[in-house]
Amino acid sequence: MASLGVGDLGAFLREQRRQAKLSLRQLADAAGVSNPYLSQIERGLRKPSAEILQQIAKGLRISAETLYVRAGILDERAQDADAGKPPGVREAIAADPGLTEQQKQSLLHIYESFRKENP
């Protein structure tokens, strides 16, 4: 089966899953999708819907917007401009292999709290 141009998304999902120390089966269960379907997404053979991406993001404990940008559903520059922040902050935190999932969530929480303090 030919790739649907979602290889970057699949590779990103695989890396996030591995960083979260979840097996493919564990993430599939947490996201409410089948193990084979999640495997096909990771290999770039399937393009998931926004709803499926949201379920996967919840299972990985990352923002759904990060996955929407990776999947091409949401334009990163437009999203960041709307939020009034420099592009890529959330994505850089989420993609950092040197941070645990808990550290990423803490950093994102701190970042958002600082953003809310400044008009």
Image (cartoon, helix red, strand yellow):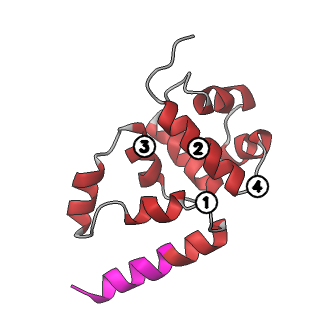
Q: How packed is label 3: few (under 14 Cα within 10 Å), some, or many (20 or more)?
A: many
In the rendered image, residue 113 lying in the magenta stretch gets the answer yes
Q: Name the residue under label 4.
A: 21
Is residue 36 left or right of 47 when viewed as pictured?
A: right
Q: Name the residue under label 2.
A: 13
Q: Mark 1 points at which residue?
A: 97
Given contact means CB atoms under 8 Å apart, are the residues at marks 1 and 4 in contact?
no
Name the amino acid, label 1.
Answer: Pro
Q: Where is residue 65 in the image (x, y as percent from the top left)?
A: 41, 53
Spatial CA span between label 1 and label 2? 13 Å
Between marks 1 and 2 in the image, the one whose residue lies nearer the viewer: 1
The magenta stretch is 108-119
Q: How packed is label 1: few (under 14 Cα within 10 Å), some, or many (20 or more)?
A: some
Name the image quarter holding the C terminus.
bottom left
Marked residue nearer the N-terminal end (2 or 3)? 2
Q: Position of residue 20 (x, y in %)?
A: 70, 57
Spatial CA span between label 1 and label 4? 12 Å
Given contact means CB atoms under 8 Å apart, are the residues at marks 4 and 3 in contact?
no
Q: Residue at x 62, y 66 (%)?
A: 98
Above or below 48: residue 101: below
Spatial CA span between label 1 and label 3? 17 Å
Name the amino acid, label 3.
Answer: Arg
In the rendered image, residue 25 lying in the magenta stretch gets the answer no
Name the image quarter holding the N terminus.
top right
Marked residue nearer the N-terminal end (1 or 4)? 4
Given contact means CB atoms under 8 Å apart, are the residues at marks 1 and 2 in contact?
no
Q: Name the residue under label 3.
A: 70
Above or below 41: residue 81: below
